[in-house]
Image (cartoon, helix red, strand yellow):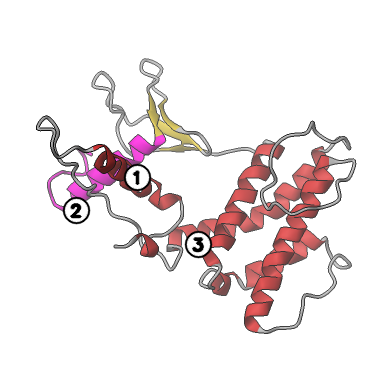
Amino acid sequence: MSDEQACPGQCNRAYREAREAFKQALADYDPLDSSQSRPIPPSIQAWPGNPWCGRCKSRIRETLAELDDLAALLMATADGHRAAPGGQRVSGTTVHLSPSGAGDDLEELTSMLAGWESAYRDLKEWRSLARRGHLASAVTTCIAWLSVHLDEILVAPFAADFGQEILQWHREFTNKTKAGARTLRRPLRCPRPQCRLLTLTWTEGDTHVICSNPDCGAHIPLAEYEMEVARLGAALERGELESEVA
């Protein structure tokens, strides 16, 4: 499968990292050095997408809807004062800065969402978007409109850019509002020989999977864990491993 057919979402992070590691290994390989072996291409397969896979489409839909709640949380917790300079805006849009950093964030979020609505209206040759804000907030109504047309937007020519920007804004607003992140159980056993219990958990946004066994407490890099999941999944498909062992 070509990289163009691979879903650009988190489902293929381990695939992309394995591909990059292989490219670097090839660049470092010296065929004249007898002590080196030619790097072996990674066996991990990518999740296909068009451009997004079904799982990532569902995540984008959920993320888009949550932007409305995150915008409300941001304004509810704003103190009316601008944060210290620093940090780069997601969209790069140049706007007039208000006394409130939260107000600027909300204005840029509205502009981003309206921009994608306008892009889809242009693609369909529909009339320009109507005036917003008299029935509900502009953010709420724009998110509702995009949600109604989301199935078509996620297969439009700009679907990959749209999805990535929605996910990026969601991450930024989640961090700014300190919205709660779920801690999820992971299905593999702890890799430490002295543990091997089904006690692995991952908190959304973290870079490590953690063993919650108080006598262990192992921290496994998320990418390493995902590669192990892919390896064991492939072994199960080939009948080389029983699910109980995995």
**Quadrant for the C terminus in the image:** top left
Q: Is 238 covered by the magenta stretch?
A: yes
Q: Residue furthest front?
A: 32
Closer to the camera in the image, 6 or 220: 6
| Magenta segment boundaries in residue numbering | 222-246
Q: Residues within 10 Å of mark 2 (few under 14, many from 20)?
A: few
Q: Is residue 40 left or right of residue 101?
A: left
Total numbered labels placed on residues in the image = 3
Q: Residue furthest left?
A: 34
Residue corresponding to mark 3: 57
**Quadrant for the N terminus in the image:** bottom left
Q: Is residue 2 left or right of residue 170?
A: left
Q: Is 243 covered by the magenta stretch?
A: yes
Q: Given contact means CB atoms under 8 Å apart, are the residues at marks 2 and 3 in contact?
A: no
Q: Residue at coordinates 34% horizontally, 36% vertically from top-left?
A: 225
Q: Residues within 10 Å of mark 3 (few under 14, many from 20)?
A: many
Residue corresponding to mark 1: 20
Label 1, label 2: how many angstroms apart (C-alpha)? 25 Å
Classified by dominant secondary structure, the portion drawn in magenta counts as helix
Name the N-terminal-most of marks 2 and 3. Answer: 3
Q: Residue at coordinates 83% horizontally, 38% vertically from top-left?
A: 78
Residue corresponding to mark 2: 237
Name the N-terminal-most of marks 1 and 2. Answer: 1
Label 2, label 3: how many angstroms apart (C-alpha)? 25 Å
